[in-house]
Every structure is written in C-alpha cells, then in structure tokens.
C-alpha cells in the first residue's frame, strides 16, 4: 500500500489517502493537547505508544465481533484504517465518576456508577465540545435517532468487552470516548482511536492513574503511564 | 386561610406554611436575579406582575386539563398552592433557539426548531444548574425513568397549550422552564411558577423581547415588558 496526499491533520493524528480504495493511512503524532488545545506539548514516544495500544484494542474488539475501522498496523506509529465519514459526536461511557462527570453532578471522584453512564458531546472545538442530549442531536441533525440508538448499543458492548479485557490485565476502565463514522456503503463503523488519550485507566488495586490525566494535571510522566498500559496489555516493549 | 411560619425563601418567592393541610402561601418578591445570582436588583412591581401572570397561566392550564399546584390567587403578590416535594430538575422546552441553546449548538438565535427541544437541568445552584441527560438523572437518582417520561410528556403538553395561548395574544413562546413536585399522595404535579422570569416571550411580529432577558442584558425596563405581557393576557392593569 502506498501513502498518498495528507487528507487531514488533527490534534493527535495525521490522515493520509492511499492507493487502496476506502483505506486511510493514519500516523499517530507525539503531540499532547488538553483543555481544548490550551495546554500543548510534544512528548517523544507518545505516538508509538498510542498506535500500539490502539492497534491491540481494535484487534481485540474485532476478535469479540465488534466491527471497527482498524485494518492493519503498518509501523510503530502508523496503522491502516477503513475510511469513514465521521459523525460529529463523541460518545463517552463511564463506569467510575471522574473529571467532568464529577464537576457536573457533584458526585465524588472514584464513585462507581450502578450502570454505565453514556454521554454524547457535539464534536466542535469552537463550541468546546459541549454535552448534548438526544433532542439536540436531532436539532443539529448530527445523527439520526436510529444511529443514536446503535451508537449507544455498540458503546455499551465496547465497554463490556474492554472493561473485562483491562481488568484481566490489572486495570480499571474508568471511562472512555469513542467516535463513529459511516462507511461508503452506509454502515455505522467504530472509528478514530482507543488509547490512553481517550480512556481513563487506573491500577485496579492502588487506583494509580496511567492515562492522559498525568499530562492534564501534570501529576507524572505520560510516557511512563502509557508504557505501563502497553506492557500490561502484552505489547512489545520498545526496542 | 391563615399564613403560618416561613418555610423557605428562594430567589424569587417566599413560601409559608398555612393552617390548611398540604397548602402553601406563596409570596412573589420584587427581587430580580440572573446568571446564577451574580446580577441582583430589586425591581418594584415585579412580584405583582409575576404573581398575576403566573396565576392566569396556571388557571389556563387547569382549564385545559393540565393539573398543577395553583389553588387560588390571594392578593396582588400572593397565591395559594398545593404543597409538593420538588424534584430537583428544571425542565426546559424550546421552540426557538435562544440563550444557552444558541451557545451550546452554534445555531443562530431566532431559528425555529422543527420539533420542541426538551432539556433537563440539575437544580443545584452550587453546580450552576448543569444540563444533564437521562443517564445522569438515573445516576443522581433525581427522578425515576417513569417520572422522566411523564415530565417530558406533560412539558410538551404545557408547551402546546401555552404556545397557542400566547400566540392568540400576539406573543411567541420562545422557551420556558418548569418544575415538578410530588404530592403527599405520590402524584407528579406541575409546581413552581410560569412567568416572564421563566419564559422567553417575544412579540409575534417585531420579535421585541418582553421577558427577563430585558434585565439579564440590560436592554430595557423589565416592568414595562412584564406589564405588556400581563395586559395582552387580559390581566388587570395596576391601580
Ligand atoms: N476511519 C476514519 N476515517 C476518516 N476520518 C477518521 C477516521 N478515524 C478518525 N478520523 C478522524 O481523524 C481526525 C484526526 O484525528 P485526531 O488527531 O484525533 O483529531 P481531533 O483533533 O479532532 O481529535 C479526527 O477528526 C477523527 O474524527
Ligand atoms: N408547590 C410547591 N411546593 C413546595 N415547594 C415549591 C412549590 N412550588 C415551588 N416550590 C419551590 O419554592 C422555592 C422558591 O421558589 P424560588 O424563589 O423561585 O426559588 P429558587 O431560588 O430555587 O428559584 C423553589 O425551590 C421551588 O422549587
Ligand atoms: Mg482526537
Ligand atoms: Mg425559581
């Protein structure tokens, strides 16, 4: 497969066209951003860690029958994915109260939710990715009611699968964000990335944080946290 | 009926116990507040205007078969209501984009929504009355799923009724906020107030604003706007 023109550069990844139909070449960057781009740093090795972890997790989901855009790992920092038209919604699932759910509800950080909490955010940097409800989604025509229903169901399935998978490796899946797109033949498909940039992951026993909160709140080395996650998931240590 | 001890003083009203079972004495105050209490003023006559308008609207809803807490108008600034245990949710219905819906979605102010947009806010001044979704309501145990369903349905019925009623008097019902409570015998009941403090009301032709936005944004006299609304609804002019 050949890498062609740059299609889009986001905060964490670059997307390139390829010579294969409906297939994109994704390069994970070393850029770390937080608070809607207010905090920014280049952290050597982050791109590799996220590409490796994301590849492992998408493969795991494939094995469990959850379709997603992942096609192949191409290099330490690159993967091939199926091209989709991204639905401008961020779907968040939460098992333990943290971050904005704590600020929104006043419920203490670390409290386990009786059932997973699903949230939709409108993917719009200028608006600050606001929380929206089903009526807002309809008003914005961001997705159809049946797409919303399907995204919720898939998100809950991803949650069950990854919660168990992380737990088997000593990690608590606190919450995560996923994105969906539509394939050229009109099917909803889990896309984007699943990595410590988009998940909160704590040690099961000590509740030590290994995810992007290390960078957000400057409480430790992001690379050390992500390396810990990759190693626990059985990924190759850096060579 | 006799007024007894002060039960609660809010930003806009005082609630007193009475000698009649399950009945409260409500006094509408002249205090105006906005932006979660940041802006504050005493506006002579506001209490009367809101009490008169709220009494007329609750009576109208009774006539249309929508149960609510209103019992009787007691004086220019007072009314008797059925006591309820307030559910800590603000239910907002929107027909035209304004205020926070504009800021949240980026959709232009004044845009008509194809269908009414219903929102739930968690009634908590310290948290700034945040928008929440059905999963948050369940997590907070603020209301049961069946209460949520009933509140949505009643809110839509209130919207249909009041939209028509205001329209008959040359006014556009842009949006409004209502609150519900539970009666002593476990029934959901529309409570609190419906007034230009809690509705956006624009002139049907010119779109001139007659509601609390006059005070929020300092764009005109609140008392003049509320007087216009009261007069159009056929309420008694002062004096
Ligand atoms: N399979 C895909 N097809 C097309 N676009 C995708 C796919 N997967 C992810 N994207 C998009 O790639 C863009 C780049 O990713 P990222 O750097 O994370 O962007 P952002 O700054 O929006 O978070 C995002 O807009 C994301 O939605
Ligand atoms: N029928 C009722 N029974 C008991 N409480 C009520 C009833 N109707 C309204 N309330 C409550 O009365 C309180 C006072 O009203 P208000 O001054 O508007 O308060 P706030 O500052 O919370 O807006 C509010 O908490 C409201 O929910
Ligand atoms: Mg991203
Ligand atoms: Mg009030």
Image (cartoon, coloured by chain):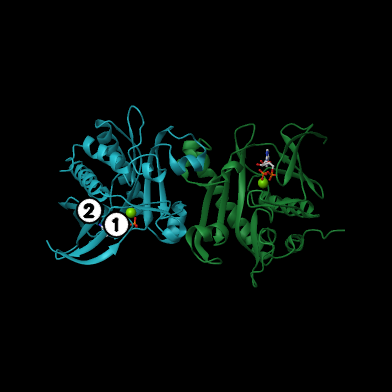
Chain colours: A cyan, B green
**Label 2 C-beta lies within 8 Å of the nearest ligand 1 atom:** yes
The mark total stands at: 2
Q: Could you tell me which quadrant the N terminus of chain B lies in?
A: top right
Image location (x, y in percent) of residue A209: 35, 36
Residue under the image location 62 percent in, 31 percent down? B185
Q: Residues within 10 Å of mark 2 (few under 14, many from 20)?
A: many
Residue under the image location 37 percent in, 45 percent down? A215
Which residue is more in the foreground, B177 or A164? A164
Tell me: B208 left or right of A78: right
Image location (x, y in percent) of residue A12: 31, 55
Would residue A154 be visible to someone looking at this image?
yes
Which residue is more in the foreground, A91 or A39? A39
Residue under the image location 53 percent in, 58 percent down? B101
**Label 1 C-beta lies within 8 Å of the nearest ligand 1 atom:** yes
Q: Residues within 10 Å of mark 1 (few under 14, many from 20)?
A: many
Dividing the picture into quadrants, the one containing residue B8 is top right
Q: CA distance from mark 2 to mark 1?
A: 9 Å
Would residue A186 be visible to someone looking at this image?
no
Dividing the picture into quadrants, the one containing residue A88 is bottom left
| Element class at badge 2 | loop
Image quadrant, ligand 2: top right
Q: Which mark is residue B202?
A: none
Q: Which mark is residue A181?
A: 1
Circles 2 and 1: CB atoms closer than 8 Å? yes
Name, please, the residue furthest toward the top: A205
Where does label 2 land, which residue? A69
| Element class at badge 1 | strand
Q: Which is nearer the N-term, disc 2 or disc 1? A: 2
């Amino acid at each position: 497969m050949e890498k062609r023109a740059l299609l889009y550069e986001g905060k964490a990844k670059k997307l390139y066209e390829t010579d294969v139909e409906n297939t994109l070449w994704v390069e994970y960057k070393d850029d770390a951003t937080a608070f809607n781009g207010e905090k920014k740093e280049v952290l050597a090795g982050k791109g590799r860690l996220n590409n490796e972890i994301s590849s492992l997790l998408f493969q795991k989901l494939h094995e469990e029958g959850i379709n997603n855009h992942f096609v192949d790992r191409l290099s330490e920092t690159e993967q091939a994915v199926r091209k989709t038209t991204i639905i401008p919604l961020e779907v968040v699932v939460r098992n333990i109260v943290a971050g904005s759910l704590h600020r929104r509800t006043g419920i203490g950080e670390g409290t386990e939710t009786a059932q997973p909490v699903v949230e939709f955010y409108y993917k719009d940097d200028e608006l600050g990715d606001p929380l929206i409800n089903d009526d807002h989604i309809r008003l914005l025509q961001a997705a159809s009611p049946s797409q919303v229903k399907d995204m919720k169901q898939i998100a809950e399935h991803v949650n069950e699968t990854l919660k168990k998978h992380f737990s088997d490796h000593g990690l608590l899946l606190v919450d995560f964000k996923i994105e969906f797109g539509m394939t050229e033949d009109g099917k909803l498909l889990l896309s984007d990335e699943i990595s410590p940039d988009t998940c909160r992951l704590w040690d099961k026993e000590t509740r030590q944080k290994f995810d992007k909160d290390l960078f957000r709140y400057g409480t430790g080395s992001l690379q050390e946290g992500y390396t810990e996650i990759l190693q626990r998931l059985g990924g190759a240590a850096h060579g």
